[in-house]
Image (cartoon, rainbow, N blue to C red):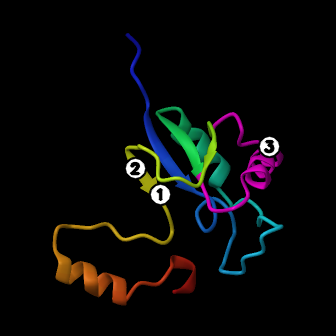
Amino acid sequence: MADVKKTILLDLDGVINTYSNDYNPDYIPPLRDGARQFVEKLSKKYKIKLFTTRNKMLASMWLLENNLNDFITGVTNTKELCWLFVDDRCICFNGNYKELFDDIENFEAWHKK
């Protein structure tokens, strides 16, 4: 029996594209430097789905235009069953609500720092 790849939901804006808080519903910014190589390497061990609130057809076309369609198995805006989420706007809960509250209060996206 073949090993089943774990699924990773990989965020689009701010993770694999050059988004910097200038949202335009009709335009997806260019691919970040190194993102294609990262996604290709990741796809060898994991099943990757693109996680985005953007229009699914626009995001799918962006994947094709950036030659990522061989490495990313689909596009979703739903929190699907997965092993891991990769996002530029998230906090990992460590079991401590006080620390979580403080992390929320002090949060800044990496591109805002």
Q: How many residues crowd around disc 3 within 10 Å: few (fewer than 14), some, or many (20 or more)?
A: few
The quarter holding residue 15 reads bottom right
Q: Do callouts 2 and 3 mark residues in contact (Cβ within 8 Å)?
A: no
Q: Sequence order check: which comes first, mark 3 or mark 1?
A: 3
Question: Is residue 36 toward the left or the right of residue 6 in the image?
Answer: right
Q: Nearer the viewer, residue 20 or 41?
A: 20
Residue 6 appears in view? yes
Q: Position of residue 80 (x, y in %)?
A: 46, 47
User: What label sits on residue 86 in the rendered view?
Assistant: 1
Q: Is residue 55 above or below residue 2?
A: below
Give the Cα distance between marks 3 and 1.
21 Å
**Amino acid type assigned to the residue bearing label 1 in the image:** Val
The residue identified by callout 3 is 64
Question: Is residue 81 toward the left or the right of residue 94 in the image?
Answer: right
Q: Position of residue 56 (x, y in %)?
A: 72, 52
The quarter holding residue 25 reads bottom right
Q: Nearer the viewer, residue 108 or 74?
A: 74
Residue 38 appears in view? no
The residue identified by callout 2 is 84
The region drawn magenta spans 51-71
Give the Cα distance between marks 2 and 3.
24 Å
Q: Which type of secondary structure does the marked residue at label 3 adopt? A: helix
Question: Is residue 74 toward the left or the right of residue 66 in the image?
Answer: left
